[in-house]
Image (spheres, rainbow, N blue to C red):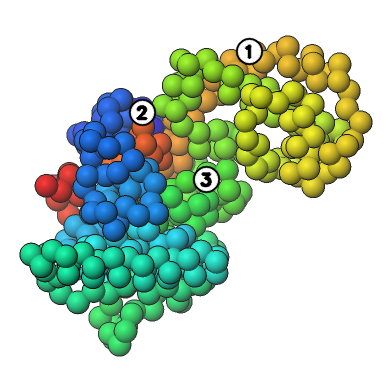
Amino acid sequence: MGHTPLLMAGSPGWTEPATAGHTAAGDAWGRGSGQTPSEFLENPSQSSRLTAPFRKHVRPKKQHEIRRLGELVKKLSDLTGCTQVVDVGSGQGHLSRFMSLGLGLMVKSIEGDQRLVERAQRLDQELLQALQKEEKRNPQVVQTGPRHRPHHVVRWVDSTALCEELLLPLENSPRSEARLLLTGLHACGDLSVALLRHFSCRPEVAALASVGCCYMKLSDPGGYPLSQWVAGLPGCELPYRLREGACHALEEYAERLQKAGPGLRTHCYRAALETVIRRARPELRRPGVQGIPRVHELKIEEYVQRGLQRVGLDPHLPLNLAALRAHQAQENRVVAFFSLALLLAPLVETLILLDRLLYLQEQGFHAELLPIFSPELSPRNLVLVATKRPLGETFSVLETEDS
């Protein structure tokens, strides 16, 4: 999101979002540095800010994300006196592991996919063993307190209903004394909305740190708009195509355009595949086509056949090769169209995130959007931070790098 807020300050009903002056990842909205984060200057695949055990099985992008968000959550937890962090949509548990075994936080990790939870538990055990071996090799490294591995729970969280499991304290601490911090690293679609609603309506939830993603999966209505102000704007609706476009990475695509490689052909091939799908199954809208490797080496008819198979259709359907060749001749125009559509992505993401910010501010909560990730590594780089008591200038401390 490398852009200025696009709702007009001073308009009727405008609530000024506190977002100015943040420079952690570029300009005020975290875009534009174009520089590799210092933690990857020595080795582009290994963060120098994480020890080897915490880097294992974790890609560079995720290393950067778990470190930056984990450190922010730790500071926010200390500032708000939270007793427990709840990581919602935790996947394989990389963030939960770093927060619990790396930063000493009490963490409940909630994920709806049983397979991911089982893998997370195996990785927890593997990390514990690696940390113990490291301490034996290096006696100077002393663990200052007991290690608490994340507490994993298999549970789907519904954005329209309260999840009691999410709110239950760990161990034997009285529920009346629990102070929870909810977080989600690229919580998909309505999951980010669920975090906001739990924060808003439950007194035991004292703080929130949410990084959203997959805006095209937001319920309509229900997931957007959330705030009264945005809901009152004429034409505030965001159709699927706009929300899907907001999930693409400008930085990565600009680099692809500069290289002008054959990989850009994917757009044209996918558009041609869509025409075939709609002719065969008109009711099949927006089918997800899993990545087809080495597209640039395929003939267009080969790509279409593989794509049909991936969406459950007969790959041997009769194809109009002349029509496919005509589509392929439009390759440059398709790339130009996609590029123009992508220019709207920052505007759409701005609207969605400001809507969430205003939703919290309308209820009297204190909220900011902070750019904490390098957008070159993590395009969805803004975290929505909220508390129920004012932190004032302390908000600015949350996005600063730890020494």
Query: Callout 3, which amino acid?
Result: Cys
For the point 75% across and 24% down, the residue is 300
Which residue is labeled 2 in the image?
2
SS of the residue under disc 1 = helix
Which residue is labeled 1 in the image?
Answer: 332
- Residue beneath disc 3: 214
- Label 2 sits on a secondary structure element that is loop
Amino acid on which the number 1 mark rests in the picture: Asn
Instruction: Compare marks 2 and 1 and give the one earlier in the sequence.
Output: 2
Between 356 and 265, which is closer to the camera in this rendering?
A: 265
Image coordinates of residue 62 in percent, x first then y, are 37, 48
Q: Would residue 340 be visible to someone looking at this image?
A: no
Instruction: Compare marks 3 and 1 and give the one earlier in the sequence.
Output: 3
Asked where in the image residue 323 lies, by quadrant, the reply is: top right
Question: Badge 2 local density, few (<14 within 10 Å), some, or many (20+)?
Answer: some
Q: Is residue 207 above or below residue 282?
A: below
Measured Cα–Cα span from mark 2 to mark 1: 26 Å
Relative side of 207 to 306, left or right: left
Graded by Cα atoms within 10 Å as few (under 14), some (14 to 19) or many (20 or more), the crowding at tag 3 reads: many
Residue reaching furthest to the front: 137
Q: How many numbered markers are drawn?
A: 3
Residue sitting nearer the eye, 296 or 403:
296
Residue 164: give x, y in percent of width and height.
46, 76
Determine the residue positioned at 59% across, 19% down: 262
Q: Determine the CA span between mark 3 and mark 1.
A: 27 Å
Residue 328: tell me if it is visible: yes
Q: Quadrant of residue 268?
A: top right
- Name the amino acid, label 2: Gly
Indicate whether 330 appears above or below 276: above
* Secondary structure at numbered mark 3: loop
